């Protein structure tokens, strides 16, 4: 790398540093509040910094090796490896046991000093107390869950590894065939993203992926459930209301609420039915009355006619 | 390696441009204090537990306007204001301008007390109450119902259960057949132990669902999005539009545990709606019982609800008046995309008016 190239790269990195400091200050001065689900400048700043570092490092490598074609192939492969590594790290972050959960698990598994237990077991190997046995069984279950999680994670990682390899191979082939013309590092990254997502979309449609995805999700949930359960036991032992007990109360409440709703709806519909019946009766009465009125009118008319005819008769000489 | 067309000079130019964009983007964001969503004026006419029913009156001066009120039932995932994101991107505002009276259900944010709220509650209590309130407020015997995404699936169930209440039904980006080949979301949840998830978390955190949606395009919605961002946030208008969408994406309520369990197991895993096996509350839900006119709108590039998952509806319902409209857009583009914004509100209002 020439001194001149070194200088521009250094200048760029300095500029990048200054920019990212500007970004960091933005999160303090801006009215954007990440708590309300808004964009988080600090989070964005950290992410973009990572990516710009990555691109700058690739740029540096490229300018050092740009002369010969075999070097370009090597550089291209190392660029894809870097992207791949980054992608894998991002994907993994979603399936990592949260630190606080790991801490809780450790606390639970070591809630009683191991040494003391081993000493007790060593001195009385055939007669352990119920409490010790419970603790042993719980610890064993916790360890089993952890092992199952690790296995599921390893299986899952293998799939991601395959996706990365497949995406890299595809991109390399396209570039070698002349199907791709890449004019910038950003463009290279975009092609990588598109290819990766396309391969990923094919893979996640397979039953194998669905199975591995189910396994890792379920194993993480098992670990959280195990931690909750142990925490519940401790809370209960202290005489506080546990999560399970609270759930039971709420389930009963929910059932009662449903019953009340059904009663109210039935009441409303029976009121409605009663009202409809009443209206029907009234309508029938009204229609009967109308008929009676018609009859009466008819009778009145007949009587009136008869009366008139009688009057006419009496007036005749 | 003939495809690599850059050199040190081009790289220098590229980095300088990237930094320029990043700098402008920072300056633009520094000027924005907050972004508002849901700009259309409304009146809250009903509150029940966490839900609110909002009324958006249509323009009375429009001569050819449907007289039957339109009730919008949004999904339990994310928030209803995707339909009223900003003045330029508001399906509600445009429908109002075409004279349509609209009622929108805001489901609110379920909390621990909603852990056991199930689909029976959502349909036979919450949605039914909203339909009754809408009728009462509008002085109408029936309503037009518009369901969005999962809200569309719920609307189909409701219409099958209470056919006499619904005059016309509109479904937008609505999954019906959950087992079509392209339904990636359905494949992802196929092997999830839903009982374990609900027993572990109680309500399912909205952030967890967001992570699932993001995982469908990990690069596009992850590192590539970050890298593209400075270029997209050069002006305050661009930045505000982006921030509104971000706010909507991240504003995802937790899902009531029992309702989530039932929806995933019955619809995603067992496809009961299509298999004619669904029962909600004490009643069987049969799509063949839907005999009112249906307008089914789907996005041709929808990766969350693929077109075939929506189009399956046509052959399953009992109505003879079934209309389909494809929009060249993705799941969200159907509501905020340029093409959809121009054509869809008019298509909806005309379809309703001709069946009023």
Image (spheres, coloured by chain):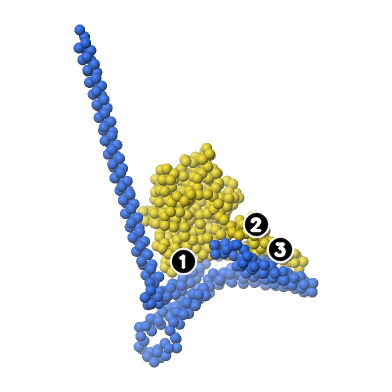
Residue at 65% x, 57% y: name it: B236
Work out whether mark 1 precedes mark 3 in sequence or the reverse, and give the earlier one.
3
Q: Tell me: A6 left or right of A105.
A: right
Residue B54 position within the rendered picture, expressed as x and y whole percent measured from the top left? 47, 50
Whole-number angstrom distance, CA of label 1 to CA of label 3 = 45 Å
Q: Are marks 1 and 3 on the same chain?
A: yes
> Which is more foreground, mark 2 or mark 1?
2
Q: Chain of mark 2?
A: B
**Which mark is drawn over residue B20?**
3
> Which is more foreground, mark 1 or mark 3?
3
| Quadrant where the image shows the N terminus of chain A | bottom right
- Asked if the residues shown at circle 2 and circle 3 are in contact, with their CB atoms under 8 angstroms apart, the answer is no
- Residue nearer the viewer, A19 or B223: A19
Q: For mark 1, what is the residue?
A: B192
The colour of chain A is blue
The colour of chain B is yellow
Whole-number angstrom distance, CA of label 2 to CA of label 3 = 16 Å
> Which is more foreground, mark 2 or mark 3?
2
Is residue B121 visible in the rendered structure shown here?
A: yes
Residue at 44% x, 78% y: name it: A142
Mark 2, residues whose alpha carbon is within 10 Å: few (<14), some, or many (≥20)? some
Residue B281, image quadrant:
bottom left
Q: Is residue B318 above or below residue A142?
A: above
Work out whether mark 2 precedes mark 1 in sequence or the reverse, and give the earlier one.
1
Is residue A177 visible in the rendered structure shown here?
A: no
Secondary structure found at label 3:
helix
Secondary structure found at label 2:
helix
Residue B57 position within the rendered picture, expressed as x and y whole percent measured from the top left? 50, 45
Residue A187 position within the rendered picture, expressed as x and y whole percent measured from the top left? 68, 63
Q: Residue furthest top?
A: A317
């Amino acid at each position: 790398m020439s001194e001149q190239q070194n200088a521009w790269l250094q200048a760029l990195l300095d500029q990048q540093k200054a920019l990212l400091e500007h970004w960091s200050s933005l999160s303090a001065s801006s009215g954007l509040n990440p708590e309300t689900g808004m964009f988080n400048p600090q989070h964005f700043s950290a992410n973009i910094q990572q990516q710009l570092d990555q691109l700058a490092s690739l740029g540096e490598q490229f300018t050092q090796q740009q002369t010969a074609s075999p070097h370009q192939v090597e550089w291209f492969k190392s660029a894809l490896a870097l992207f791949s590594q980054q992608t894998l790290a991002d994907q993994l972050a979603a399936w990592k046991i949260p630190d606080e959960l790991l801490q809780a698990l450790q606390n639970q598994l070591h809630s009683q000093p191991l040494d003391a237990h081993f000493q007790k077991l060593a001195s009385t190997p055939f007669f352990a107390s119920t409490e010790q046995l419970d603790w042993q069984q719980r610890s064993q279950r916790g360890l089993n869950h952890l092992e199952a999680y690790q296995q599921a994670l390893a299986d899952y990682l293998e799939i991601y590894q395959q996706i990365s390899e497949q995406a890299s191979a595809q991109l390399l082939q396209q570039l070698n065939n002349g199907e791709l013309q890449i004019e910038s590092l950003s463009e290279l990254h975009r092609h990588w993203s598109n290819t990766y997502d396309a391969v990923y979309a094919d893979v996640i449609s397979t039953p194998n992926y669905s199975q591995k995805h189910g396994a890792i999700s379920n194993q993480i949930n098992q670990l959280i459930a195990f931690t909750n359960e142990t925490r519940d036991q401790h809370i209960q032992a202290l005489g506080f209301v546990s999560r399970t007990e609270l759930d039971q109360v709420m389930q009963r409440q929910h059932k009662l609420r449903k019953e009340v709703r059904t009663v109210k709806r039935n009441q409303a519909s029976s009121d409605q039915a009663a009202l409809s019946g009443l209206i029907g009766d009234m309508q029938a009465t009204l229609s009967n009355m109308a008929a009676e009125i018609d009859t009466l009118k008819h009778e009145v008319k007949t009587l009136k006619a008869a009366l008139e005819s009688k009057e006419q008769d009496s007036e005749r000489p | 390696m003939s495809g690599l067309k850059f050199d040190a000079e081009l790289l220098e130019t590229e980095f300088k441009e990237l930094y320029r964009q990043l700098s402008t983007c920072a300056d633009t964001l520094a000027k924005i204090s907050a972004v508002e969503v849901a700009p259309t004026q409304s009146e809250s006419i009903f509150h029940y537990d966490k839900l609110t029913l909002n009324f958006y009156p249509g323009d009375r001066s429009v001569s050819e306007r449907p007289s039957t009120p339109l009730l919008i039932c949004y999904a339990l995932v994310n928030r209803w204001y995707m339909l009223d994101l900003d003045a330029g991107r508001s399906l509600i505002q445009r429908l109002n301008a075409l004279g349509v009276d609209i009622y929108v259900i805001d489901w609110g944010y379920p909390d621990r007390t909603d852990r056991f709220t199930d689909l029976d509650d959502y349909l036979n209590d919450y949605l039914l109450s909203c339909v009754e309130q809408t009728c009462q407020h509008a002085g109408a015997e029936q309503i037009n119902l518009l369901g969005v995404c999962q809200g569309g699936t719920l609307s189909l169930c409701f219409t099958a259960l209470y056919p006499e209440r619904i005059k016309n039904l509109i479904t937008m980006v609505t999954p019906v057949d959950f087992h079509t080949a392209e339904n990636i979301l359905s494949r992802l949840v196929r092997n999830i132990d839903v009982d374990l998830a609900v027993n572990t978390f109680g309500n399912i955190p909205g952030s967890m669902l967001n992570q699932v949606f993001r995982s469908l395009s990990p690069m596009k919605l992850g590192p590539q999005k970050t890298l593209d961002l400075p270029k997209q946030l050069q002006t305050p208008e661009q930045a505000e539009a982006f921030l509104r969408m971000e706010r909507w994406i991240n504003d995802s309520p937790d899902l009531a545990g029992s309702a989530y369990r039932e929806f995933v197991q019955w619809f995603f895993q067992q496809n009961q709606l299509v298999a004619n096996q669904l029962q909600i509350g004490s009643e069987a839900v049969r799509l063949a019982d839907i005999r009112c006119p249906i307008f089914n709108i789907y996005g041709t590039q929808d990766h969350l609800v693929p077109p075939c998952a929506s189009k399956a509806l046509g052959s399953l319902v009992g109505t003879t008046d079934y209309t389909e409209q494809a929009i060249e857009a993705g799941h969200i583009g159907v509501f905020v995309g340029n093409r959809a914004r121009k054509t869809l509100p008019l298509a909806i209002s005309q379809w309703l008016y001709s069946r009023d």
